[in-house]
């Protein structure tokens, strides 16, 4: 890229490296602009193994950048001088390079030109990756020069050679070549021309490193060859994944080989200068401006806010990964997480410690930029403890001799890193780890910390009694839990079911299976799993018992107790993310308990504990939408997209945000983007597209989106909603017979899946459809079945559900001409309202009161226009929390449903003969107003009724236009409908 100089910043009294960009590069304006953008990206990388970039500057025709000055030599020079490196030195350097790359990759940056010449080794043996200035954002385009790909052929991945986009796996390939070179003294592919070398990268298998360097261990040989796979899908997928295997190989070496040896500093191409322009060929103005550049553009590391450790928590402990010294790789997973987690669970259940759970430690690791690290070694454990205020760290190892298993642990003071005590427990057979060893080691830790065992209580340190007697079952349970938090629910279910297959009485696994089935939308399987969890809950920890009982009471509809139990979990286990997540979801979704502010508080606590928990950003954004804070919602959704790259859901939610803002065209763009990213797993986006098209009165397109979902493999709740939505649209368009079939299909799916709630909702819709069709006995029959079923399912919903039933029953009475019965229903509805605690829901029920009261007045021919205008012209902001267009079964759609079309105001004006006011009111009803919070659909019958008013007023042209609009929308309506026949006759007469 250009020559490098050591320069001295006189203002800050700091040495910096000054890299002069080659003139042929500097002459290209596009290149200048590109470097400006790339340096902005590179400056984001702040890691001990990345050479810091300070700024990029243009002065006249000269371009130069300033960066951290590293006293040492580049790795290329080091390899050239030493010929080959020892295995320990090579591994230590590779590990540091991988850690630096991992930080860059986390920020969405790939190097693209990684080579030994771009790695500096400082005087203390620390490796630093340089020249991210020509890296590109993973979200941007490639960089080419005269049709050639920027890079060095000896270190280019096959995909780069072919001109394809480079992602982090290209850097892993380059690191594999660097490792190959460090241990063998040569690169794997050599040739006389760059083209011949590049061609070998994509077509020839690499030499086996161990044949060139027999001294390297087989583990390192396999590691290098995996890095050099031609198919990037077969390589290590992340730097963190590579680091796990590097650590394993490094741990197998003698201790003396694990650290890069200190050596005398040798600088490469260093020139100490006094800023003499003629000698350096740098314009004088550029030189004199250097101090200003450094003052105004350089952000030195020292200016970053320092991390302040929290206060130390008394009796707090972290348990990190154990070393697998059995010689059997099958024990890697058990040592890395399962055995430490068992010890964590046992110590937590003792009730005398604050124990950092495995989820908590992985959340902190993510914040440290180590998202994919599986093996938490002692060093990481000490750093985790410093960040969490934890007093003690436990590390350990597992060895095996014949049938004898030996577990060794060490208890460290986290702050001083001094060994406090070492313990050992052994037993015959793997089962002894759970049956005796974890308990013995837990008791040893308690005694070492001065805790009296008699205070803990009998049985509390018996891990097998509160989890499982099978290490394999526990390992699969942990995998299921890990998959769940990554929202990979199918894999989570598979692993958790394996745990239960091994141990059919594993209560904790059943509880997690219930949670997973809930996420998959399978209530029947959820209920079966939580019933089993309750059955075996005597064999669960205190914390798990609380979770199990909370789940049970929540399904029973005892929401007050549910909230109390989640709060109790938080009080006893203050860094328990799951309880906050459960409460946030509850206050977002539970009819009668909706509380956007409380939900936001809970999601904020989730994000305090885990800033990378993507779905919390989504859920919190939706609550801000409920509150009308659109800019805040979009800000959170953009953050959601940044922490969850490749996920379609953020774009779906941004589309919904624009829908709420009334920007329907933008909403459609984002919905389509979400579907393009993930066309198979987002049924809600299809519902959203259908709803927006229906709002634009393009019902054919709306139904086409629904039909695209039908026939796909969807979970039962999604199938139910799809058919309910289709049934609703057909009902809306006068296709009553088809809507009945759709509602019946939804009902059957819900019944066969054991989803009673979906089944009952479908019955409610059938009641509405029968009401429209004029089959009132069947309508009332289905209405009664819906209410009885819902109250049996959720007894506590009686208070909230009966006003709904009263409203629908009152409408049915009016259709049957039972005026007195309708009035009685209205009075009963009013009597039930004072007991409703949810303010939003009470507002909604008051609105339904107004609807029923208005219908009664209109049908009695005595409308109070002033009251009607007041009731139906004011802003209905309380409807916002119910307006989820992808949850078409939610209550907002009942307000759209026939037999009325929300034309109370124009009908009232008509009864008083005020035709102009009636027409104006109808025009408002059929005109979409983006400024309004009202997103209800425009009922086609409005056009028919408005046409009659225009005809009455003598405006034949407008009357005909409205009749035609109505007939076009209802062109496929059932034959013989009086409205269709009436419109045709009136149109023909005009």
Image (tube, rainbow, N blue to C red):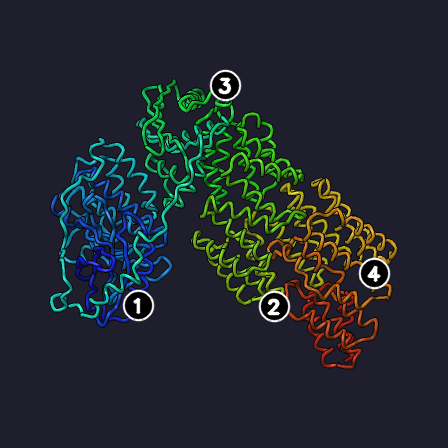
Q: Earlier in the sequence, mark 2 or mark 3?
A: 3
Q: Earlier in the sequence, mark 2 or mark 4?
A: 4
Image location of residue 555, percent across then percent down: 64, 39
Image location of residue 708, percent across then percent down: 56, 57
At x 21% / y 51%, what residue is drawn? 70
- Residue on which disc 2 sits: 930
Q: Is residue 297 above or below residue 48?
A: below
Q: CA distance from mark 3 to mark 4?
A: 73 Å
Q: Earlier in the sequence, mark 1 or mark 4?
A: 1
Q: Nearer the viewer, mark 3 or mark 4?
A: 3
Residue 33 numbered tag? 1
- Residue on which disc 4 sits: 856
- Residue on which disc 3 sits: 454
Q: Are marks 1 and 3 in contact (CB under 8 Å)?
A: no
Look at the image and tell me in which quarter the N terminus lies: bottom left
Q: CA distance from mark 1 to mark 2?
A: 40 Å
Identify the secondary structure beneath mark 1.
Answer: helix
Image location of residue 434, percent across then percent down: 44, 23
Q: Nearer the viewer, mark 2 or mark 3?
A: 3
Identify the secondary structure beneath mark 2.
Answer: loop
Residue 700 in sight from this viewpoint: yes
Q: CA distance from mark 1 to mark 3?
A: 71 Å
């Amino acid at each position: 890229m250009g020559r490098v100089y050591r320069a001295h910043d006189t203002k800050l009294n700091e040495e910096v490296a000054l890299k002069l960009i080659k003139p042929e590069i500097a002459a290209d304006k596009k290149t200048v602009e590109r470097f400006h953008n790339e340096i902005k990206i590179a400056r984001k990388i702040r890691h001990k193994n990345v050479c810091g970039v300070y700024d990029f500057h243009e002065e006249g025709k000269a371009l130069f950048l300033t960066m951290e000055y590293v006293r040492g030599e580049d790795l290329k020079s080091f390899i050239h001088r030493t010929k080959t490196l020892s295995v320990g030195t090579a591994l230590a350097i590779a590990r540091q390079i991988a850690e630096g790359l991992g930080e860059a990759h986390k920020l969405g940056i790939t190097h693209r030109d990684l080579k030994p010449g771009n790695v500096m080794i400082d005087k203390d043996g620390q490796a630093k990756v340089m020249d991210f200035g020509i890296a590109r954002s993973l979200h941007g385009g490639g960089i080419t020069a005269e049709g050639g790909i920027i890079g060095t052929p000896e270190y280019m991945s096959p995909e780069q050679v072919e001109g394809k986009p480079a992602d982090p796996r290209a850097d892993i390939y380059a690191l594999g070549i660097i490792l190959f070179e460090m241990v063998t003294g040569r690169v794997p592919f050599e040739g006389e021309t760059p083209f011949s070398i590049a061609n070998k990268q994509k077509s020839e298998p690499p030499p086996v490193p161990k044949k060139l360097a027999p001294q390297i261990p087989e583990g390192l040989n396999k590691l290098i060859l995996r890095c050099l796979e031609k198919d990037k899908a077969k390589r290590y997928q992340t730097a963190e994944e590579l680091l796990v295997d590097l650590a394993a190989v490094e741990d197998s070496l003698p201790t003396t080989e694990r650290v890069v040896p200190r050596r005398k500093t040798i600088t490469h191409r260093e020139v100490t200068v006094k800023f003499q322009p003629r000698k350096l060929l740098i314009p004088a103005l550029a030189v004199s401006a250097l101090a200003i550049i450094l003052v105004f553009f350089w952000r030195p590391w020292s200016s970053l806010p320092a991390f302040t450790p929290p206060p130390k928590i008394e009796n707090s402990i972290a348990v990190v990964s154990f070393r697998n010294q059995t010689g059997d790789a099958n024990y890697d997973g058990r040592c890395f997480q399962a055995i430490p987690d068992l010890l964590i669970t046992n110590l937590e259940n003792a009730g005398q410690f604050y124990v950092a759970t495995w989820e908590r430690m992985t959340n902190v690791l993510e914040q440290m930029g180590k998202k994919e690290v599986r093996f938490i070694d002692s060093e990481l454990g000490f750093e985790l403890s410093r960040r969490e205020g934890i007093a003690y760290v436990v590390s350990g190892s597992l060895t095996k001799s014949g049938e004898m298993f030996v577990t060794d642990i060490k208890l460290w003071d986290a702050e001083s890193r001094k060994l406090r005590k070492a313990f050992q427990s052994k037993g015959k057979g793997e089962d002894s780890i759970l049956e005796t060893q974890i308990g013995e080691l837990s008791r040893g830790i308690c005694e070492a910390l001065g805790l009296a065992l008699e205070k803990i209580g009998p049985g509390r340190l018996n891990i097998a009694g509160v989890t499982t007697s099978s290490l394999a079952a526990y390992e699969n349970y942990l995998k299921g839990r890990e998959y769940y938090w990554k929202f990979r629910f199918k894999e989570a279910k598979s692993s958790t079911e394996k745990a239960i297959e091994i141990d059919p009485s594993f209560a904790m696994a059943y509880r997690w299976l219930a949670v997973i089935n809930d996420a998959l939308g399978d209530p029947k399987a959820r209920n079966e799993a939580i019933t089993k969890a309750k059955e075996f809950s005597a064999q669960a920890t205190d914390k798990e018992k609380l979770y199990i009982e909370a789940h049970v009471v929540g399904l029973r509809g005892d929401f007050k107790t549910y909230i109390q139990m989640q709060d109790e979990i938080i009080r006893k286990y203050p860094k328990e993310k799951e309880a906050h997540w459960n409460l946030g979801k509850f206050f977002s979704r539970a009819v009668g308990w909706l509380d956007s502010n409380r939900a936001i508080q809970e999601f904020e606590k989730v994000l305090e504990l885990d800033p990378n928990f993507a779905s919390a950003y989504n859920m919190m954004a939706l609550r801000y939408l409920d509150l009308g804070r659109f800019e805040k919602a979009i800000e959170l959704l953009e953050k959601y997209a940044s922490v969850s790259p490749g996920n379609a859901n953020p774009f779906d939610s941004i589309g919904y945000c624009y829908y709420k803002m009334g920007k329907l065209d933008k909403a459609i763009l984002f919905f389509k983007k979400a579907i393009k990213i993930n066309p198979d797993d987002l049924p809600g986006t299809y519902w959203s597209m259908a709803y927006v098209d229906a709002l634009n009165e393009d019902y054919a397109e709306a139904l086409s989106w629904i039909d695209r979902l039908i026939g796909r493999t969807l979970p039962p709740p999604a199938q139910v909603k799809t058919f309910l939505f289709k049934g609703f649209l057909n009902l809306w368009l006068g296709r009553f017979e088809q809507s009945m079939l759709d509602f019946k299909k939804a009902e059957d799916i819900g019944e066969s899946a054991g989803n009673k709630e979906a089944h009952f909702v479908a019955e409610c819709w059938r009641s509405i459809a029968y009401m429209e069709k004029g089959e009132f006995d069947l309508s009332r029959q289905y209405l009664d079945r819906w209410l009885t079923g819902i109250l049996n399912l959720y007894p506590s919903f009686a208070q909230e559900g009966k006003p709904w039933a009263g409203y629908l029953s009152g409408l049915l009475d009016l259709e049957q001409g039972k005026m007195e019965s309708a009035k009685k229903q209205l009075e009963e509805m009013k009597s039930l309202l004072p007991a409703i605690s949810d303010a939003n829901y009470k507002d909604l029920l008051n609105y339904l009161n107004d609807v029923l009261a208005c219908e009664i007045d209109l049908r009695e021919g005595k409308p109070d226009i002033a009251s009607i205008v007041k009731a139906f012209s004011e802003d209905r902001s309380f409807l916002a929390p119910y307006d989820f267009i992808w949850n078409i079964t939610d209550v907002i759609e009942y307000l759209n449903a026939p037999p009325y079309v929300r034309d109370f105001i124009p009908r009232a004006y008509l009864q008083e003969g005020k035709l102009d006011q009636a027409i104006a009111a109808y025009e408002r009803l059929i005109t979409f107003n983006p400024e309004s919070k009202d997103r209800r659909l425009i009922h086609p019958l409005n056009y028919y009724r408005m046409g009659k008013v225009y005809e009455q007023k003598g405006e034949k042209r407008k009357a005909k236009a409205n009749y035609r609009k109505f007939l076009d929308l209802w062109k496929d309506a059932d034959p013989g409908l009086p409205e269709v026949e009436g419109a045709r006759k009136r149109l023909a007469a005009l």
